[in-house]
Each structure stands twice: as structure tokens, then as C-alpha cells.
Image: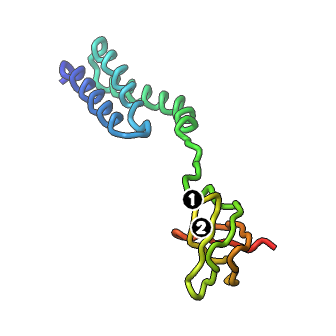
Amino acid sequence: MEEYMPYVWLAVIVVMAIVEAGTSQLVSIWFVVGGIVALLVSVFVPTIWIQLLVFLVVTGVTLVATRPLVKKMMQFKKEDTNAGRFIGKEGFVIVNIDNEAGTGQVNVGGSIWSAKSVDGSVIIKGRSVKVEEIEGVKLKVRAIY
């Protein structure tokens, strides 16, 4: 069995590399590194338990040493896309806003949106409003007095 261990470690390296290539997170790169070191050890030390111990230690050490750095690098700043940029902006009513009737449109930054008032009040055409939140495809606005 010991004469086959380099092939076993090579298989571990290849399988873990394929798994790593198929993910967007670094989840198995440490096993690849451990497998490489275990493969090198298997050439000089035929004892399987020593190879396994080296594999586990190297994998554990590389995981502990690099995981915080990798986590920091993989954190992406959440950016508001499209609609989120309108929250807090001011606009004006172009169609009376009446939540009960289900009517209302506003112009915010040149974009026309369906709208409803956050407090349920009727807001008449021409009034300035501030976008408080987005609910589905409608802006929830408050009249600016």
C-alpha cells in the first residue's frame, strides 16, 4: 500500500484543485497545499500515518494562517444598485399620490416612479417629496413642507 501513496496524494491534490476551481470562495486550497507536502514526504518516508499527520498539520497550519486574510480579501462592499440610490433623494409629484386609490407618480432625478405616501396622506401634483424607502417597484415618499 505504501508504494501507492504518492498516487493517492496526487489524486487528493487533483480532486481538491478541481473542487477549488469550481467555487468562488477559497474552500479547499489548503487541502491542495497539504497534499503537495504529503506527496513530497511520501517520496522519502513510506510510513502512511506520518504522511497523514503531515497532511493534517500542514492543512491546519495553512488554514489558520491564511483564513483571516482570505476572509478579509473576500469581503465585498455592498453597493446600492439602481433603485437604492433614490432613497433620501428629493423629487416632485407628477400624478396625485393617493394610496387608497392606488395612484401616484413622482419624478426623482429624471426617473418616473410609481409612488405612495409613507403616512397614507394624499400628496397633490407639483408637491416636493423625499424618498423614504422602496417597496417592490414603488417609492414610498413623504411630502416636504
**What's the mark number on residue 74?**
none
User: What is the quadrant of the N terminus in the image?
Assistant: top left
Badge 2 vs badge 1, beta-carbon distance below 8 Å: yes
User: In the image, is 25 to the left or to the right of 103?
Assistant: left
The residue at 29%/33% (across/down) is: 18
Task: Provide the secondary structure element on which disc 2 rests.
Answer: strand
Residue 112's place in the image compared with 104, above or below, is above
* Residues at marks 2 and 1, CA–CA distance in whole angstroms: 8 Å
Q: Residue at 69% x, 65% y: name it.
A: 91
Callout 2: few (<14), some (14-19), or many (20+) C-alpha neighbours within 10 Å?
Answer: some
Instruction: Please state the horizontal and vertical placement of residue 104, each as a whole percent of the image.
Output: 60, 77
The disc, 2 or 1, on the residue closer to the chain's N-terminal end is 1
Residue tagged by mark 1? 83
Q: Quadrant of residue 127?
A: bottom right
Residue at x-position 29% and y-position 17%: 42
- All told, the count of numbered labels is 2
For this orientation, the residue located farthest to the bottom is 100
Q: Position of residue 76 (x, y in %)?
A: 55, 42
Q: Residue at x 27, y 33 (%)?
A: 15
22, above or below 109, in the image: above
Look at label 2 and name its amino acid.
Ile
Q: Which residue is mark 2?
A: 134
Residue 56 quadrant: top left
Which residue type carries mark 1?
Ala
Q: Name the colouring of the figure.
A: rainbow
* In this picture, residue 101 sits left or right of residue 58: right
Residue 133: percent from the left, percent from the top? 64, 67
| Secondary structure found at label 1 | helix
